[in-house]
Image (spheres, helix red, strand yellow):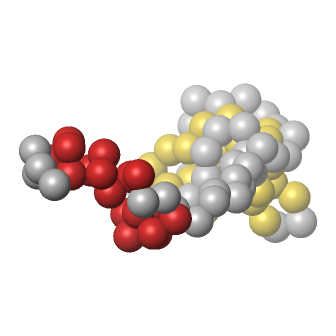
Amino acid sequence: MDKYAIVKDGVVINVIEYESQPSSPPSGFESGHVAILADRVSPNWHYEDGKFFDPNPPELVEMPQPTTLTDLILNNPDELARLKTALGITP
């Protein structure tokens, strides 16, 4: 079975699996709906110039580089004392 995007006016309104290419309009849909073979789309995506695209793509967030325990201790020796206390190691 293949996934088909049901598109009307350039917007995906549903994604349905069919065993073969459905008619246009697909059974159960009004005139103006078209079924287009599509693997990775979701409702509300747009279809333009033969391509699907997400009108609200996820925002990429820059994450700071994580600090290693070694760097934390080297940058602040008091952290070593706190770590030893937390682990029950007495100086």
Residue pictured at 70% horizontal, 58% vertical: 62
Residue pictured at 30% horizontal, 46% vertical: 82
Q: Is residue 67 left or right of residue 38?
A: left
Q: Is residue 52 left or right of residue 28?
A: right
Residue pictured at 72% horizontal, 29% vertical: 30
Residue nearest the viewer, comparing 75 with 3 = 75
Residue nearest the viewer, comparing 5 with 60 = 60
Residue 78 in the image: state x and y as whole percent.
Answer: 41, 52
Residue 25 in sight from this viewpoint? no
Residue nearest the viewer, comparing 17 with 62 = 62
Quarter of the image where the C terminus is located = bottom left
Residue 83 in the image: state x and y as whole percent.
Answer: 26, 50
Residue 50 in the image: state x and y as whole percent.
Answer: 81, 67
Residue 86 in the image: state x and y as whole percent.
Answer: 20, 42
Residue pictured at 73% horizontal, 49% vertical: 59
Residue 40 in sight from this viewpoint? yes
